[in-house]
């Protein structure tokens, strides 16, 4: 099976913004009477006004960022045409369909109420309803009032500000301190090619990669920028992207074991998990797999043994890997694939 990947640079990736939507007003109903030869008192024949255009959001798997909405933040649908004589109805205003990435959450900006969570390809939601067209005077004719001289005005279309928030859909969320080897790993197991360098915060935006672990079997991995202490309060770069691992079923926690580290790997593991819990306690309820990375740059095994013992105690599945040499990577990917399959089977049974 072909593997592929996606990564976002700083000029392309947008995952949270505000847009304005204004649906079209309904057309007015018409006041009109038949004018025919030898019929001095023709009955009413005013047509109804057309419905105003609505604004809809549609989830598309072809999109991976809200960049389009960043440069086009106002959407105004056309109004419905007015009704005319001879029972002619006004034409409805054309709906506007705004395409957004799958995984986009739509909120009313003022009330912060969730309107929709678009997680299925092609899923649509009306975010601003077009106004109904007004009734023409023909609709008001009765046996008592056969010649009404009034019609109904069209209704106003809905107007609102929306907050769009994208949460990437992935099976595995890769977490860890800056420079823990997340980008190197995702480039090793998928076709994603994020920027990689030997200094912190190389990754400035999330990376997505699809890893193949068997015949026609694959899963999606999301790598977010590294977390630092205080991330839950907005420090560092990872905080603004933590929402992207909220949908994942498994967390892959990478811990640097190379000779360059100055802090115990257990301390770094606990520090990152502490930030996750402070951001959202639900993240700590997710299954977590720990991988000690950069063992190709490790000359002593003290850190490896310490981390391995800790993971056994905490019942975290542990792997020692090198994304550079490939050691341990195949076993890790195979295990992750099996865990993803278990999660998918459970969702099919109970979902």
Image (cartoon, rainbow, N blue to C red):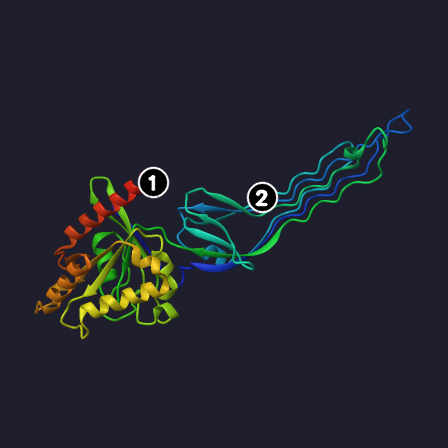
Please state which of the two labelled residues, at mark 2 or mark 1, is closer to the viewer: 1
Can you tell which quarter of the image residue 151 is in?
top right
Q: Name the residue under label 2.
A: 95
The numbered mark at residue 68 is: none
| Residue at far left of view | 300
Q: Quadrant of the C terminus?
A: top left
Q: Residue placed at 76% from the left, 37% from the top? A: 136
Residue 310 horizontal/vertical position (percent): 16, 63
Q: Give neighbour class at mark 1: few <14, some 14-19, many 20+ (Cα, 10 Å).
A: few
Q: Residue placed at 76% from the left, 32% from the top? A: 87
Residue 79 horizontal/vertical position (percent): 66, 46
The answer to whether residue 179 shows anywhere in this view is: no
Q: Name the residue under label 1.
A: 350
Question: Of 188 and 268, which appears nearest the observer?
Answer: 268
Mark 2 element type = loop
Above or below: residue 201 compared with residue 41? below
Nearer the N terminus, badge 2 or badge 1? 2
| Residue at far front of view | 313
- Number of numbered discs on residues: 2
Q: Residue placed at 34% from the left, 60% from the top? A: 281
Residue 272 horizontal/vertical position (percent): 28, 66
Describe residue 90's horizontal placement relative to residue 35 as left or right.
Answer: left
Q: Residue placed at 40% from the left, 59% from the top? A: 13
Mark 1 element type = helix
Question: Of 116 and 134, which appears nearest the observer?
Answer: 116
Describe residue 221's horizontal placement relative to residue 149 as left or right.
Answer: left
| C-alpha span from label 2 to label 1 | 37 Å
Q: Quadrant of the N terminus?
A: top left
Describe residue 82's horizontal placement relative to residue 1 as left or right.
Answer: right
The answer to whether residue 50 shows anywhere in this view is: yes
């Amino acid at each position: 099976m072909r593997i592929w990947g996606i990564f976002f640079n700083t000029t392309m990736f947008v995952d949270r913004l505000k847009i304005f939507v204004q649906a079209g007003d309904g057309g007015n109903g018409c006041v009109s009477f038949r004018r025919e030869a030898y019929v001095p008192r023709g009955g009413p024949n005013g047509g109804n006004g057309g419905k105003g255009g609505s604004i809809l959001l549609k989830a598309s798997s072809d999109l991976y960022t809200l960049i389009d909405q960043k440069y086009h933040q106002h959407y105004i649908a056309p109004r419905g045409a007015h009704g005319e004589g001879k029972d002619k109805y006004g034409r409805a205003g054309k709906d506007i369909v705004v395409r957004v990435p799958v995984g986009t959450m739509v909120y009313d900006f003022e009330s912060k109420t969730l309107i929709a969570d678009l997680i299925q390809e092609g899923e649509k939601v009306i975010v601003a309803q077009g106004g109904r067209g007004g009734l023409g005077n023909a609709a008001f004719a009765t046996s008592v009032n056969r010649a009404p001289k009034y019609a109904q005005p069209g209704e106003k279309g809905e107007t609102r500000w929306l907050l769009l928030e994208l949460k990437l859909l992935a099976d595995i969320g890769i977490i860890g301190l800056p420079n823990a080897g997340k980008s190197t790993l995702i480039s090793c197991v998928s076709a994603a090619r994020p920027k990689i360098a030997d200094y912190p915060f190389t990754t400035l935006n999330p990376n997505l990669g699809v890893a193949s672990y068997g015949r026609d079997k694959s899963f999606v991995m999301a790598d977010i920028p590294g977390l630092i202490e205080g991330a839950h309060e907005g420090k560092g770069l990872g905080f603004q992207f933590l929402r992207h691992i909220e949908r994942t079923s498994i967390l892959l926690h990478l811990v640097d074991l190379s000779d360059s580290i100055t802090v115990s790997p257990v301390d770094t593991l606990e520090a990152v998990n502490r930030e996750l819990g402070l951001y959202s306690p639900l993240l700590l309820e997710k299954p977590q797999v720990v991988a000690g990375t950069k063992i190709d740059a490790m000359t002593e095994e003290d850190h490896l043994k310490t981390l391995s013992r800790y993971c056994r105690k905490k019942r975290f599945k542990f792997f020692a890997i090198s994304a550079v040499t490939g050691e341990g990577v195949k076993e890790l990917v195979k295990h992750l694939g099996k865990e993803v399959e278990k999660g998918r089977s459970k969702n099919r049974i109970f979902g």
